[in-house]
Image (cartoon, rainbow, N blue to C red):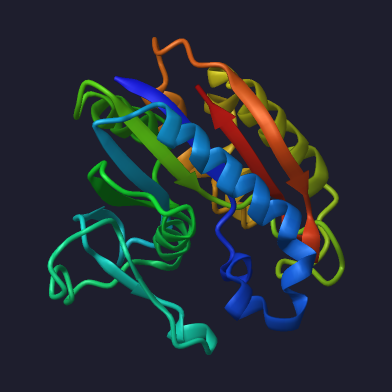
Amino acid sequence: MLVAAAVCPCPPLLVPEVAAGAAPELDAARDACLDAVGVLAASRPDLLVVVGPGDDRVAGPYPAGARGSFRGVGVDLDVALGDAPPDAAADRPLPQSLTVGAWLLGRARWAGTPVEGLAVAESEATRECAEAGHSLARRAERVALLVMGDGSACRTLKAPGYLDERAAAFDAGATEALGSADLDALAALDAALARELKAAGRAPWQLLGGAARDAGLVGRLLYEDAPYGVGYTVAAWS
């Protein structure tokens, strides 16, 4: 059963070594993410699963100890999901979203609870996401989720997806749903529109909605902004 969830954005810029001189610009987001992870720790789960978006090539489960790297963005920094032998899962590196999630857990000094990963294909349909979440919540008596995902990438002219007038409203609706743990509103997010707005968090958020059915969790919004023209939301459910 799902007992807690943390929703965080997944840009590599959350990592200070990656952001370099721009690191202070995301201090508030970084602190909010660590606060959300603290809610997960307080729930004392039997299993923590880091969920994030990925393309069809990387979608699927990742075991404890799976490793990711920030070398692709110019930083010699490796991370791993929880504790495992040094050579665990070396042949299948974590996708970017789970790599950022693993970094957050390391920053928060997560220990004790087993950690696994799950990359959700951004093409996954709403119903399939919800069903996957429902199954995931039944993996253990007390399950917690660290859900990584960004909102639209179309909030400004300099955003990765350029300016789209629909982006602000999409992000506002998603943020309201995540901040209040509104499962129906999450399920109602338009997958086609999310794809057009490059909102990579849609599938993981809808998986969270499926996992939280009948869990009775209450949401709390910790952060919302659109630095660099990308919607970032941090929320905690408990």
Q: Position of residue 202 (x, y in %)?
A: 54, 43
Q: Is residue 206 visible?
A: no
Query: What residue appears at the point 29 percent right and 34 percent down from the top-left corner?
Result: 132
Q: Position of residue 93 (x, y in %)?
A: 28, 72
Q: Is residue 104 above or below residue 169?
A: below
Q: Quadrant of residue 109?
A: bottom left
- 57 vs 191, left or right, is left
- Which one is in front, 72 or 160? 72
Query: What residue appears at the point 69 percent right and 31 percent down from the top-left corner?
Result: 221
Query: What residue appears at the point 55 percent right and 58 percent down from the top-left corner?
Result: 10
- 104 vs 94, left or right, is right
Q: How many marks?
A: 0
Q: Is residue 166 above or below residue 14?
A: above
Q: Is residue 1 above or below residue 59?
A: above
Query: What residue appears at the point 42 percent right and 21 percent down from the top-left corner?
Result: 212
Q: Position of residue 152 (x, y in %)?
A: 69, 52
- 86 vs 161, left or right, is left
Q: Position of residue 166 (x, y in %)?
A: 80, 46
Give the quarter of the figure containing the N terminus.
top left
Q: Is residue 146 above or below residue 25?
A: above
Q: Is residue 85 visible?
A: yes
- Which one is in front, 155 or 101? 101
- Which one is in front, 14 or 211? 14
